[in-house]
Image (tube, grey):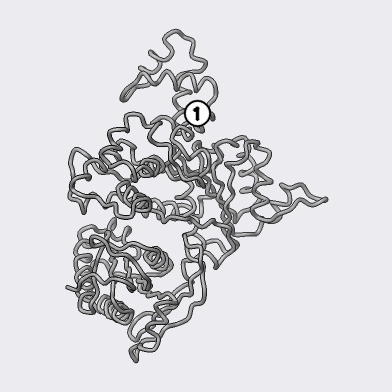
């Protein structure tokens, strides 16, 4: 087995396209196929001098001292996969990406910008496709095997990266070479913001949201959940994955900064570049602009302008090809709306500690580690801190924002010391990034944002519900919270409203 290369390294990342569907269709067959897939990749990578430094699910991450070795490993792996028998699952379509750069090797893992770039390059590929960055192409172009070519796909804007990448596709005899346009941000019109950090986990949720938006009968899908669950980030990732579905574009409309429902139309118009004319109202101008367009609107943070929701319905009725993906702590309550409650990140059970490798496959722990390394580059989960990390993630209910706020303290607090201070979450979780919205910089601000959306009667009921330490029945709530008959609303209506507003489960 090759030792981990250092200095300038060529990274080969791979994963199986559509693996979630394959697992759900036939877990037994997929398990057997994955064993064969893993053997082929590991053997081929090691034969060509590569070092497999990480596997996550069906994804392989390998490092090579030379770009030519990495390219040859990719070609041979694809040929072996293509020629193997996959009776029960059908051909496993594996996408691959190659990028070269300087990275730091530490404790068997690698850190540095090249890993983010190769990961985003991989996300642009289709199963069976091999993509290369300009850097890697420059290193291998004069040493290509006779039956291998590199096709110039041009410069593209990749998800989560500020600098565009010049992309090349490997074409080799015996392998498929015809693929659709890359999964990128610049093929169709859009204004999707670039994210400064990669999305951790959430593959299943992104796929489920994308599938639902694609369904003909779904015109309005609302992602709901309490503050800090990652609704916006999830919505943006799903929207980026849906770019190929909407020929007229995908447009993000941030509503968090407005509080007047009357401003919803003008905010949407500004995002689309639509101006009010002297002959038409702004709403009429919007309808005219959108009427024949196959377009997705992402309406973010709708909860504080809910009175403006009928406008969305008007647009959907007037514009038959328009679809809306909304994020809100509260459903919009429009006819035809479908709701997608955003779940917390997958969590370990602190009472049943798995192995370190298994622990780091949980999404909450993956997020903890990824964000911790951004603050403290040498952070890792060890036998000594594993139980504390698992307990922190569990105590924070897998809430992404809460985990990120906790991890911000990792420079000065060990996981165990963080855990010791979690008794007062509002004091510990106060170190959000300066470029976050004000409501997301502390846990208190996130809670206050949700609380401020409540009616007075709901606030009274919410306060009285604090006497319940665990589960509660509606009969118990009625008996305890309205014992004096002074609750300003029906308890049942109040409970339903608090559930809708993501403050009660």
Residue 375: x %, y % from top left: 37, 50
Determine if residue 223 is in view.
Answer: yes
Q: Dividing the picture into quarters, in which one does residue 390 lie?
A: top left
Residue 232 horizontal/vertical position (percent): 49, 47
Residue under pointer 1: 451
Q: Secondary structure at mark 1?
A: helix
Quadrant location of the C terminus in the rendered image: top left
Single out the residue that lies furthest toward the bottom: 146
Give the position of the N terminus as an image quadrant. bottom left
Q: Name the residue nearer the viewer: 288 or 436.
A: 436
Q: Is residue 355 above or below residue 445?
A: below
- 475 relative position to 83: left or right: right
Give the residue at x 68% y 50%. Answer: 269
Give percent across and percent down for residue 114. Answer: 39, 67
Residue reaching furthest to the right: 278
Which residue corresponds to the image point at 29% horizontal and 61% vertical from the top-left? 22
| Residue name at image x 22 percent, y 68 percent | 38
Q: Residue at x 57, y 35 (%)?
A: 304
Q: Quadrant of residue 229?
A: top left
> With 247 as the anchor, is 41 left or right in this view?
left
Q: What count of labels does the image hold?
A: 1
Q: Is residue 32 above or below residue 495?
A: below
Is 84 placed above or below 378 here? below
**Label 1 crowd bin: few (<14), some (14–19), many (20+), radius 10 Å:** some
Q: Is residue 382 left or right of residue 189?
A: left
> In this view of the protein, can residue 244 be seen by the observer?
no
User: Where is residue 441 drawn, in percent x and y?
Assistant: 47, 40
In the image, is residue 306 above or below residue 95? Answer: above
Residue toward you, 464 or 126? 464
Name the image quarter holding residue 133.
bottom left
């Amino acid at each position: 087995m090759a030792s981990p290369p250092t200095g300038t390294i060529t990274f080969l990342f791979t994963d199986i396209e559509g693996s979630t569907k394959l697992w759900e269709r036939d877990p037994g067959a997929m398990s057997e196929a994955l064993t064969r897939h893993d053997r082929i990749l590991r053997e081929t990578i090691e034969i060509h001098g590569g070092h497999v430094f990480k596997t996550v699910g069906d994804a392989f991450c390998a490092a090579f001292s030379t770009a030519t070795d990495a390219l040859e490993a990719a070609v041979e792996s694809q040929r072996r996969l293509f020629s193997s028998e996959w009776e029960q699952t059908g051909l496993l379509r594996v996408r691959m990406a190659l990028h070269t750069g300087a990275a730091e090797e530490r404790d068997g893992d690698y850190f540095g910008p090249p890993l983010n770039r190769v990961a985003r390059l991989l996300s642009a590929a289709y199963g069976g496709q091999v993509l290369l960055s300009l850097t890697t192409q420059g290193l291998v172009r004069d040493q290509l095997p006779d039956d291998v070519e590199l096709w110039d796909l041009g410069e593209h804007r990749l998800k989560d990266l500020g600098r565009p990448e010049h992309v090349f596709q490997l074409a080799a005899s015996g392998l498929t070479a015809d693929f659709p346009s890359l999964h990128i941000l610049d093929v169709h019109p859009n204004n999707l913001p670039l994210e400064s950090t990669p999305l951790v986990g959430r593959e299943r949720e992104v796929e489920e949201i994308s599938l639902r938006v694609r369904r003909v009968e779904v015109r309005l899908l609302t992602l709901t959940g309490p503050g800090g669950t990652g609704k916006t980030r999830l919505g943006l990732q799903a929207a980026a994955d849906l770019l190929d579905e909407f020929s007229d574009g995908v447009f993000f409309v941030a509503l968090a900064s407005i509080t007047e429902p009357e401003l919803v139309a003008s905010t949407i118009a500004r995002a689309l570049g639509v101006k009010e004319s002297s002959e038409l109202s702004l709403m009429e101008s919007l309808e005219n602009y959108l009427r024949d367009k196959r377009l997705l609107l992402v309406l973010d943070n709708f909860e504080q302008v809910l009175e403006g929701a009928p406008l969305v319905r008007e647009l959907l009725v007037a514009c038959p090809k328009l679809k809306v993906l909304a994020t809100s702590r509260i459903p919009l309550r429009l006819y035809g709306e479908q709701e997608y409650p955003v779940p917390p990140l997958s969590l370990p059970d602190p009472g049943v500690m798995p192995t370190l490798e298994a622990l780091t496959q949980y999404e909450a722990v993956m997020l903890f580690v990824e964000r911790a390394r951004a603050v403290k580059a040498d952070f890792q989960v060890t036998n000594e801190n594993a139980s504390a990390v698992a307990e922190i993630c569990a105590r924070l209910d897998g809430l992404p924002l809460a985990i990120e706020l906790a991890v911000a303290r990792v420079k000065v607090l060990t996981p165990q010391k963080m855990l010791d201070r979690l008794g007062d979450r509002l004091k510990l979780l106060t170190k959000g990034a300066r470029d976050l919205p004000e409501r997301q910089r502390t846990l208190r601000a996130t809670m206050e944002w949700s609380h401020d959306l409540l009616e007075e009667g709901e606030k009274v009921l919410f306060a009285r519900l604090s006497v319940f330490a665990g589960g509660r029945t509606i009969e118990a709530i009625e008996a305890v919270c309205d014992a004096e008959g002074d609750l300003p609303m029906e308890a049942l209506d109040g409970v339903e409203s608090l559930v809708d507003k993501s403050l009660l489960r």
